[in-house]
Image (spheres, rainbow, N blue to C red):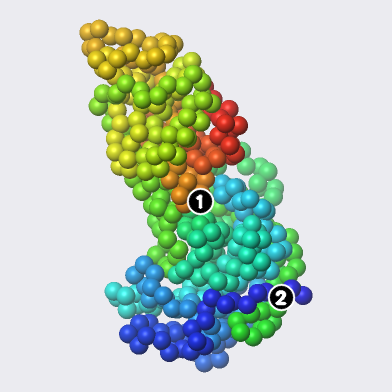
Amino acid sequence: MFACRKDNSLQSNDSLITDPGAFTALQAKAYLDGVLGSTSGTLKIQSVDTDQNNANGLIYWKKTKQYTNKNFNVVEVPLIIDKRTAKLYNFAQDNVQDKPDLSVAVASFVRILVYKDINTGAIDKKIVTYLPDKAYLKAHKNDAGNNWIGKMDANFSGYLEYKSWEGVVQYVLRIVGGKQTARYKLTGLISKTQVQSLKTNYWDTVPTWVDDYSMWCVSAGEGAATCSPEWIGGHYEMVTVWVDDPPTDPAPPDDGSGGGGGGGGGGGGSTAEASLDANTPGVKPIAEYKDKCSGAVGMYNLAKANKDKEIIGLLTQDGQVIVVAEIASGGTWGGLGADGYYRYPDSQGALSGTYSGMTHDTNTNMYAIPIIATIHTHTPCLTVGTNGVSGPISDEDLKLANAYTFLNHYIIGCDAIANFTSVSIQPHVLATGDISSTCGSIVY
């Protein structure tokens, strides 16, 4: 038997009476009593876990938390289920430090969200399972109970599984630094044989293994439970690695990337990325690097020194890197022609280095350098704790990839490098680790 830690976060003086002008725990209880058709506070398991039968969930009303999230007044309350399945998600693009195991299953817990729309007055409900990362648990004595949707630890990391009232998993949120960095939809079970027969390299939808633990629990009072977990195997799920529209339910805030995991930053980027204006002439490169590795490290260092800016670099035919822009969120850069040449006025001066295929047109007074790849940084991840490349590319990146399908396109994140193409909104993580040791993943 394993003792789950007490859920100390939901204390409100053990009272259902709070601010009379808000949506109160008492009102939430009345709403659920109407849904359940009783005042027992007990749910049949079909309402909370479609994987289990003949089990019940006890709503522990003495430990509630009330808060405002988005346009909702929310009441969050513990749900102790005597038999449930803990699904240990571990999506590859999240680069989870420690593989989830029994300790994560034991520390997982379930809450009910009852929330009222401030504008319309409509009331709805969701069931949320908290699955903290093993690394977070090791740093917090295997206890994540002080976290709730309305207020999370600044270093909380893990997954939140959202279920409908009927017990169907609707989506899973990846949380890093207390904020969303990615969203996932589970689109169906798939057998091992089917996984092995897949011949397409899926980027938007991928088969993912999920370990399953059966949790037998009894109430230990004060919102806690004593549980006995048993590993019952696992299954493959087809997972859509990005949900275009943010969930409308109460949820932790995005990490600033327009939806977490990407948006304008691929897992921690800016809300609006720099975009290319091909009709605008370029400028003399602000930095030159003799090879791709010194260029990648140099760009990363520039980004660290200018966290509010995106660094734009170009890889030349002979493997050198020129940095052509440092741009604030939403800005533009120019100079890259439809023929793959970067051009800038000769009045700004010649470059220090020599570049294969470079020309000087005295009629147009322009230098032209042939390019084989674009490179740009996603280093707002330095402030939000993500790797900067795990989420979808922005509209600006997608337009760039569509316009220059003959070029390679790379993202430098935080200890991670990815590439992207016009056929997928999801970057492909090439390598993780120190940029100086992973720069070899940039090919030409």
Q: Which residue is drawn at 66% across and 42% down?
A: 197
Q: Which residue is drawn at 60% across and 32% down?
A: 437
Residue 239, how many percent across, how many down?
A: 55, 52
Residue 412, how many percent across, how many down?
A: 48, 36
Q: Which residue is drawn at 73% across and 60% down?
A: 233
Which residue corresponds to mark 2?
3
The secondary structure type at the circle numbered 2 is: strand
Q: How far apart are marks 1 and 2 (CA)?
A: 31 Å
Foreground pick, 244 / 64? 64
Foreground pick, 52 / 420? 420
Judged left or right of residue 46, residue 235 is right
Circles 1 and 2: CB atoms closer than 8 Å: no
Amino acid tagged 2: Ala
Judged left or right of residue 327, residue 432 is right
Numbered label attached to residue 385: 1
Residue 298, how many percent across, how many down?
A: 47, 29
Image quadrant of residue 145? Answer: bottom right
Q: In this view, does 8 lie above or below 388?
A: below
Q: Residue furthest right?
A: 1
Foreground pick, 377 / 443? 377
Q: Is residue 431 above or below residue 71?
A: above
Front of the two marks 1 and 2: 1
The secondary structure type at the circle numbered 1 is: loop
Q: In this view, does 54 lie above or below 443?
A: below
Count of residue discs: 2
Amino acid tagged 1: Gly
Q: Which residue is drawn at 38% across and 82% down?
A: 23
Dot 2 alpha-carbon crowd within 10 angstroms: few under 14, some 14 to 19, many 20 or more: some
